[in-house]
Amino acid sequence: MPRNLASSTWDDEPRTKTGRRSRWDDDEPRHRRTPKLTTDDQGGPPEGARWSTWDDIGIPHGPEPHPDWVVQTLGAIDYELGILKTGKEADVHLVERSVPDTDIGVLMAAKRYRGAEHRMFHRDAGYVEGRRVRESRMNRAMAKRTEFGRELLSGQWAYAEFTLLGDLYSLGAPVPYPVQLDGTEILMEFIGDPDGTAAPRLAQYRGTADQLHDLWDQCVQAMCLLAAAGYAHGDLSAYNLLVHEGRLVVIDVPQALDIVANPRGPQFLRRDADNVCKWFSSHGVPADPADLTHRLLDEARMLSPGQR
């Protein structure tokens, strides 16, 4: 699938102090599908499928211009192909959006946040500091974790992740493109191969020394870009970094936080640095968490002149 990042490269957007370009500035085809999907006898979606919700009223879309691979055609069908990942907060499914009886189709990942009846967001108290909704009743419900409050949190986390993915994508960060948000479901770019094989996590990756050093450079670039934009991932580790065709991709960003508004922002920034440095160091890449933390705080303009 063509990935059009002409408007979101390190040359077109503000750079971090690294001054380096994003790795996501090419137009290589990736995983556009040639579907074989047809409608049923009544002209509706086949079993296990649904009409595309792209044109539904109130559906937010990802940042414009939309990449060429995003299927916006009326009459497209979303077909469930299986589950990619299960988690305490959300499950990720593989979905093919196709136009029946044509060669138009693409694979996407559908991240669906769990509702109030499931265990969810057991660690969210520190992350939501600095985040508030306008109505005090909603704030109290979320703080007390009532059923209503948990439903609100589910929607809030989905909205937070969708919004942040759009912001980071527009900055040229290596994140999946967010296609649309429908309630507690985010449809986003699938990072993987045309046959539906998902890209491995960094924790599963086995590469050469040169490849690992290159991935370390990409990781530092991504973290610096987030810090310069005022964000910490908040839960960054080798388990939410994907490796696809030599590129590092940051995923699972619902808990990303404003490091200025959140009183524990620098603490989360430091923890992200500790986590990634520990993994890379254990795989033979020199990575100093203190140096990286200092660099990130500098990118975030949180150091005094005497500390730089």
Image: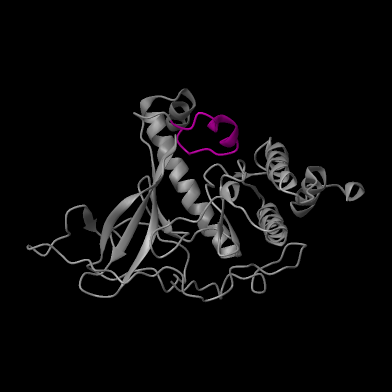
Q: Quadrant of residue 95?
A: bottom left
Question: For the point 47% across and 69% down, which residue is it?
Answer: 64
Which quadrant of the rendered structure holds the N terminus?
bottom left
Work out whether 136 lies above or below 214: above
Give the residue furthest to the left. Answer: 42
Place of residue 56 in the rendered image (x, y in percent of width and height, measured from the top left):
28, 59
Query: Of residues 158 and 237, which is closer to you in this image?
Result: 237
In the image: residue 222, left or right of residue 136: right
Residue 15 location (% of width, % of height): 71, 66
Q: Quadrant of residue 17?
A: bottom right
Q: Residue at x 68, y 69 (%)?
A: 21
Name the colouring of the figure.
one colour
Above or below, 127 relative to 46: above
> Is residue 36 or residue 292 the one in the foreground?
36
First to last magenta residue range: 120-135
**Horizontal and vertical percent for residue 283?**
71, 48
Percent from the top left, x then y, of residue 192? Answer: 46, 60
127 inside magenta stretch: yes
In this rendering, position of residue 297 left or right of residue 31: right
